[in-house]
Amino acid sequence: MPEAASVQSTRATIGASEFDRDTAVTPRAPGVYDIDLSAGWTIINAVNGGYLLAVLGRALADALPHSDPFTISAHYLTASRPGPAVVRTETVRTGRTLSTGQASLFQLDEQGREVERIRVLASYGDLDSLPDDVRTTAEPPAIPPMEQCFGPEDGGPNPVDGSSAITERLMLKLDPSTLGWALGQPSGKGEMRAWFGLADGRDPDPFALLLAVDALPPTAFELGLTGWVPTVELTVHVRCRPAPGPLRVSITTRNLAGGFLEEDAEVWDSTDRLVAQSRQLARARLS
Protein backbone atom coordinates (compact mmCIF):
# COMPACT_ATOMS: atom_id res chain seq x y z
CA MET A 1 0.00 0.00 0.00
CA PRO A 2 1.24 3.55 -0.71
CA GLU A 3 2.45 5.91 1.94
CA ALA A 4 -0.33 8.16 3.24
CA ALA A 5 -0.21 11.88 2.59
CA SER A 6 0.32 14.22 5.47
CA VAL A 7 -3.05 15.25 6.82
CA GLN A 8 -3.94 18.91 6.58
CA SER A 9 -5.63 20.59 9.51
CA THR A 10 -8.43 21.68 7.18
CA ARG A 11 -9.22 19.71 4.05
CA ALA A 12 -11.49 20.86 1.26
CA THR A 13 -14.34 18.52 0.41
CA ILE A 14 -15.60 17.43 -3.00
CA GLY A 15 -18.00 20.12 -4.18
CA ALA A 16 -16.49 22.84 -1.99
CA SER A 17 -12.92 23.24 -3.20
CA GLU A 18 -11.11 25.68 -5.45
CA PHE A 19 -11.11 23.05 -8.22
CA ASP A 20 -14.89 22.73 -7.98
CA ARG A 21 -15.42 26.48 -8.02
CA ASP A 22 -13.06 27.02 -10.95
CA THR A 23 -14.61 24.25 -13.08
CA ALA A 24 -18.23 25.12 -12.30
CA VAL A 25 -20.31 26.07 -15.32
CA THR A 26 -23.42 28.28 -15.20
CA PRO A 27 -26.38 27.25 -17.39
CA ARG A 28 -27.51 30.02 -19.71
CA ALA A 29 -29.92 28.05 -21.89
CA PRO A 30 -30.47 24.34 -22.61
CA GLY A 31 -27.07 22.97 -23.63
CA VAL A 32 -25.31 26.34 -23.20
CA TYR A 33 -23.07 27.17 -20.24
CA ASP A 34 -20.95 30.14 -19.21
CA ILE A 35 -17.67 29.99 -17.31
CA ASP A 36 -14.81 32.32 -16.45
CA LEU A 37 -11.63 30.31 -17.01
CA SER A 38 -9.38 30.87 -14.02
CA ALA A 39 -5.81 32.14 -14.42
CA GLY A 40 -4.94 29.84 -11.52
CA TRP A 41 -4.73 26.82 -13.86
CA THR A 42 -2.33 28.26 -16.43
CA ILE A 43 1.03 27.03 -17.63
CA ILE A 44 3.16 29.51 -19.62
CA ASN A 45 0.37 31.67 -21.13
CA ALA A 46 -2.29 29.02 -21.75
CA VAL A 47 -4.90 27.28 -19.64
CA ASN A 48 -3.98 23.69 -18.76
CA GLY A 49 -5.60 21.04 -20.96
CA GLY A 50 -6.63 18.78 -18.07
CA TYR A 51 -8.40 21.66 -16.34
CA LEU A 52 -10.24 22.44 -19.59
CA LEU A 53 -11.25 18.79 -19.92
CA ALA A 54 -12.72 18.91 -16.41
CA VAL A 55 -14.69 22.05 -17.32
CA LEU A 56 -16.25 20.43 -20.37
CA GLY A 57 -16.67 17.21 -18.43
CA ARG A 58 -18.79 18.97 -15.84
CA ALA A 59 -20.92 20.64 -18.52
CA LEU A 60 -21.63 17.26 -20.10
CA ALA A 61 -22.42 15.75 -16.69
CA ASP A 62 -25.14 18.37 -16.34
CA ALA A 63 -26.44 17.98 -19.89
CA LEU A 64 -26.53 14.17 -20.05
CA PRO A 65 -28.73 11.77 -18.03
CA HIS A 66 -25.62 10.03 -16.64
CA SER A 67 -23.16 11.87 -14.40
CA ASP A 68 -19.83 10.00 -14.63
CA PRO A 69 -17.39 10.26 -17.56
CA PHE A 70 -16.38 6.81 -18.83
CA THR A 71 -14.44 7.94 -21.89
CA ILE A 72 -13.79 11.43 -23.18
CA SER A 73 -11.78 12.41 -26.26
CA ALA A 74 -10.71 16.00 -26.81
CA HIS A 75 -9.17 17.84 -29.74
CA TYR A 76 -7.39 21.05 -28.72
CA LEU A 77 -7.89 23.48 -31.60
CA THR A 78 -6.50 26.77 -30.26
CA ALA A 79 -4.90 27.76 -26.96
CA SER A 80 -7.41 28.83 -24.30
CA ARG A 81 -6.81 31.98 -22.25
CA PRO A 82 -8.06 32.98 -18.81
CA GLY A 83 -11.35 34.81 -18.99
CA PRO A 84 -14.94 34.37 -20.17
CA ALA A 85 -15.86 31.34 -22.25
CA VAL A 86 -19.00 29.55 -23.35
CA VAL A 87 -19.54 25.79 -23.55
CA ARG A 88 -22.12 24.35 -25.93
CA THR A 89 -23.20 20.74 -25.52
CA GLU A 90 -25.21 18.36 -27.68
CA THR A 91 -26.70 15.03 -26.69
CA VAL A 92 -25.82 12.45 -29.32
CA ARG A 93 -27.47 9.37 -27.85
CA THR A 94 -28.95 8.21 -24.57
CA GLY A 95 -29.30 4.63 -23.38
CA ARG A 96 -29.94 2.71 -20.20
CA THR A 97 -26.29 2.35 -19.16
CA LEU A 98 -24.45 4.89 -21.32
CA SER A 99 -25.18 8.26 -22.85
CA THR A 100 -23.01 10.06 -25.38
CA GLY A 101 -22.61 13.77 -25.96
CA GLN A 102 -20.30 16.31 -27.48
CA ALA A 103 -19.21 19.73 -26.27
CA SER A 104 -17.16 22.67 -27.49
CA LEU A 105 -15.65 25.60 -25.65
CA PHE A 106 -15.53 29.02 -27.33
CA GLN A 107 -13.88 32.35 -26.54
CA LEU A 108 -13.77 35.71 -28.29
CA ASP A 109 -10.56 36.79 -30.00
CA GLU A 110 -9.13 40.31 -30.12
CA GLN A 111 -11.54 41.25 -32.92
CA GLY A 112 -14.56 40.00 -30.98
CA ARG A 113 -14.97 36.91 -33.15
CA GLU A 114 -15.92 33.61 -31.55
CA VAL A 115 -13.14 31.01 -31.72
CA GLU A 116 -13.52 27.32 -30.87
CA ARG A 117 -10.81 26.27 -28.42
CA ILE A 118 -11.55 22.61 -27.71
CA ARG A 119 -14.07 20.00 -28.89
CA VAL A 120 -14.87 16.75 -27.08
CA LEU A 121 -16.91 13.60 -27.64
CA ALA A 122 -17.70 11.60 -24.51
CA SER A 123 -19.69 8.67 -23.13
CA TYR A 124 -21.08 8.84 -19.59
CA GLY A 125 -22.51 6.25 -17.23
CA ASP A 126 -22.73 5.33 -13.56
CA LEU A 127 -19.38 4.19 -12.13
CA ASP A 128 -21.05 2.87 -9.00
CA SER A 129 -23.10 0.41 -11.05
CA LEU A 130 -20.08 -1.38 -12.51
CA PRO A 131 -19.37 -4.97 -11.39
CA ASP A 132 -16.50 -5.60 -8.98
CA ASP A 133 -14.76 -8.13 -11.25
CA VAL A 134 -11.18 -6.96 -12.02
CA ARG A 135 -8.69 -8.96 -14.10
CA THR A 136 -5.51 -7.05 -14.84
CA THR A 137 -1.83 -7.61 -15.44
CA ALA A 138 -1.11 -3.94 -14.78
CA GLU A 139 0.91 -3.08 -11.69
CA PRO A 140 1.11 0.19 -9.73
CA PRO A 141 4.16 2.32 -10.56
CA ALA A 142 7.16 1.99 -8.26
CA ILE A 143 7.39 5.49 -6.81
CA PRO A 144 9.42 6.26 -3.68
CA PRO A 145 7.54 7.35 -0.55
CA MET A 146 6.18 10.85 -0.81
CA GLU A 147 8.74 12.33 1.56
CA GLN A 148 11.50 11.16 -0.79
CA CYS A 149 9.96 12.90 -3.83
CA PHE A 150 10.17 16.55 -4.82
CA GLY A 151 7.67 19.33 -5.48
CA PRO A 152 7.86 23.11 -5.97
CA GLU A 153 7.73 23.70 -2.22
CA ASP A 154 10.88 21.59 -1.86
CA GLY A 155 12.82 23.84 -4.20
CA GLY A 156 11.86 21.66 -7.13
CA PRO A 157 12.35 22.89 -10.67
CA ASN A 158 10.15 25.31 -12.59
CA PRO A 159 9.88 23.42 -15.88
CA VAL A 160 9.00 26.36 -18.14
CA ASP A 161 9.45 30.09 -18.50
CA GLY A 162 6.23 31.98 -17.86
CA SER A 163 3.25 31.23 -15.66
CA SER A 164 3.25 28.06 -13.61
CA ALA A 165 0.24 29.06 -11.50
CA ILE A 166 -1.24 25.57 -11.73
CA THR A 167 1.55 24.18 -9.54
CA GLU A 168 0.24 26.26 -6.62
CA ARG A 169 -3.05 24.37 -6.79
CA LEU A 170 -1.58 20.90 -6.92
CA MET A 171 0.10 18.55 -4.49
CA LEU A 172 2.70 17.21 -6.91
CA LYS A 173 5.67 15.17 -5.72
CA LEU A 174 7.90 13.99 -8.57
CA ASP A 175 9.86 10.74 -8.54
CA PRO A 176 13.56 11.74 -8.34
CA SER A 177 14.44 9.18 -11.02
CA THR A 178 12.40 11.20 -13.54
CA LEU A 179 14.02 14.55 -12.67
CA GLY A 180 17.25 14.23 -14.64
CA TRP A 181 16.08 17.00 -16.97
CA ALA A 182 16.06 19.44 -14.04
CA LEU A 183 19.77 18.75 -13.49
CA GLY A 184 20.67 19.03 -17.15
CA GLN A 185 20.97 15.24 -17.37
CA PRO A 186 17.76 13.91 -18.96
CA SER A 187 17.55 10.12 -18.87
CA GLY A 188 16.30 9.77 -22.45
CA LYS A 189 13.66 7.30 -21.22
CA GLY A 190 10.58 9.48 -21.72
CA GLU A 191 9.12 8.72 -18.29
CA MET A 192 7.47 10.88 -15.63
CA ARG A 193 6.03 9.66 -12.32
CA ALA A 194 4.55 11.52 -9.37
CA TRP A 195 2.25 11.55 -6.40
CA PHE A 196 -0.72 13.75 -7.25
CA GLY A 197 -3.44 15.55 -5.36
CA LEU A 198 -5.06 18.93 -4.99
CA ALA A 199 -3.26 21.39 -2.74
CA ASP A 200 -6.32 22.07 -0.58
CA GLY A 201 -6.61 18.37 0.30
CA ARG A 202 -9.77 17.67 -1.71
CA ASP A 203 -10.05 13.96 -2.42
CA PRO A 204 -10.08 12.80 -6.05
CA ASP A 205 -13.22 12.14 -8.08
CA PRO A 206 -13.73 11.35 -11.78
CA PHE A 207 -13.30 15.00 -12.79
CA ALA A 208 -10.05 15.30 -10.85
CA LEU A 209 -8.83 12.28 -12.84
CA LEU A 210 -9.33 14.29 -16.04
CA LEU A 211 -6.94 16.86 -14.60
CA ALA A 212 -4.45 14.34 -13.23
CA VAL A 213 -3.56 12.77 -16.59
CA ASP A 214 -2.33 16.14 -17.91
CA ALA A 215 -0.80 17.76 -14.83
CA LEU A 216 2.76 16.40 -14.73
CA PRO A 217 5.73 17.94 -16.56
CA PRO A 218 5.93 16.59 -20.14
CA THR A 219 7.86 13.38 -20.73
CA ALA A 220 9.61 15.33 -23.51
CA PHE A 221 11.77 16.92 -20.81
CA GLU A 222 13.33 13.53 -20.04
CA LEU A 223 13.94 13.15 -23.78
CA GLY A 224 16.11 16.26 -23.67
CA LEU A 225 13.57 18.75 -25.06
CA THR A 226 12.45 21.99 -23.42
CA GLY A 227 9.59 24.43 -23.68
CA TRP A 228 5.86 24.11 -24.17
CA VAL A 229 4.51 20.75 -25.37
CA PRO A 230 0.92 21.55 -26.47
CA THR A 231 -1.66 18.78 -26.55
CA VAL A 232 -3.22 18.01 -29.94
CA GLU A 233 -5.58 15.22 -28.84
CA LEU A 234 -6.27 13.58 -25.49
CA THR A 235 -8.44 10.56 -24.70
CA VAL A 236 -9.15 9.57 -21.10
CA HIS A 237 -10.78 6.37 -19.84
CA VAL A 238 -12.13 6.56 -16.30
CA ARG A 239 -12.17 2.97 -14.97
CA CYS A 240 -13.32 3.39 -11.39
CA ARG A 241 -14.32 6.01 -8.85
CA PRO A 242 -11.07 6.71 -6.96
CA ALA A 243 -10.71 6.03 -3.26
CA PRO A 244 -9.82 8.94 -0.95
CA GLY A 245 -6.15 9.77 -0.68
CA PRO A 246 -3.27 10.66 -2.98
CA LEU A 247 -3.04 9.34 -6.53
CA ARG A 248 0.03 7.97 -8.29
CA VAL A 249 0.47 8.98 -11.92
CA SER A 250 2.84 7.31 -14.36
CA ILE A 251 3.35 8.68 -17.90
CA THR A 252 5.52 7.21 -20.64
CA THR A 253 6.49 8.10 -24.19
CA ARG A 254 7.92 5.48 -26.54
CA ASN A 255 7.93 7.30 -29.86
CA LEU A 256 8.96 10.85 -30.74
CA ALA A 257 8.80 11.27 -34.51
CA GLY A 258 8.14 14.12 -36.90
CA GLY A 259 7.83 16.63 -34.09
CA PHE A 260 5.02 14.73 -32.32
CA LEU A 261 4.99 12.31 -29.40
CA GLU A 262 2.45 10.21 -27.56
CA GLU A 263 2.01 10.12 -23.80
CA ASP A 264 0.39 7.10 -22.14
CA ALA A 265 -0.76 7.73 -18.59
CA GLU A 266 -1.97 5.48 -15.78
CA VAL A 267 -3.54 6.79 -12.59
CA TRP A 268 -3.65 4.61 -9.47
CA ASP A 269 -5.55 5.36 -6.27
CA SER A 270 -4.65 4.74 -2.62
CA THR A 271 -6.02 1.16 -2.74
CA ASP A 272 -3.73 0.17 -5.66
CA ARG A 273 -6.65 0.31 -8.09
CA LEU A 274 -6.06 1.49 -11.68
CA VAL A 275 -8.68 4.23 -11.87
CA ALA A 276 -7.85 6.04 -15.13
CA GLN A 277 -5.84 5.62 -18.31
CA SER A 278 -5.14 8.07 -21.10
CA ARG A 279 -3.27 8.62 -24.32
CA GLN A 280 -2.46 11.97 -25.84
CA LEU A 281 -0.72 13.21 -28.94
CA ALA A 282 1.40 16.30 -28.34
CA ARG A 283 3.61 18.55 -30.41
CA ALA A 284 7.25 18.82 -29.37
CA ARG A 285 9.58 21.73 -30.08
CA LEU A 286 12.73 20.20 -31.57
CA SER A 287 14.89 23.33 -31.59
Image: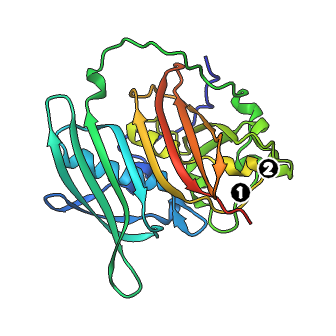
User: Where residue 94 appears, x then y in whole percent?
Assistant: 14, 39
Residues marked 1 and 2 touching at CB (< 8 Å): yes
Figure quadrant of the C terminus = bottom right
Numbered disc 1: secondary structure: loop
Closer to the observer: label 1 or label 2? 2
Image location of residue 188, percent across then percent down: 78, 43
Element class at badge 2? helix
183 on left or right of 207: right
Q: Is residue 194 left or right of residue 197?
A: right
Q: Residue at x 52, y 42 (%)?
A: 213
Q: Quadrant of the N terminus?
A: top right
Is there any visible trace of residue 97 in the rendered image?
Answer: yes
How many marks do you count on the picture? 2
In the depicted structure, whether residue 144 falls above or below residue 90? above
Residue extending farthest to the front is 258
Q: Is residue 287 or residue 218 the one in the foreground?
A: 287
Residue 205 seen anywhere in this rendered image of the structure: no
Which picture quadrant has residue 172? top right
100 vs 189, left or right, is left
* Mark positioned earlier in the residue sequence (1 or 2): 1
Kindly identify the amino acid type of the residue bearing the numbered disc 1. Pro
**Residue type of the residue flagged with mark 2:** Trp
Q: Quadrant of residue 142?
A: top right
Tell me the crowding category of disc 2: few under 14, some 14 to 19, or many 20 or more residues within 10 angstroms, Cα based.
many
**In the image, residue 83 above or below residue 53:** below
Residue 181 got which mark? 2
Pick the residue in front: 106 or 206: 106
Q: CA distance from mark 1 to mark 2?
A: 9 Å
Residue on which the image places disc 1 = 159
Q: Position of residue 173 (x, y in %)?
A: 67, 40
Coloration of the structure image: rainbow
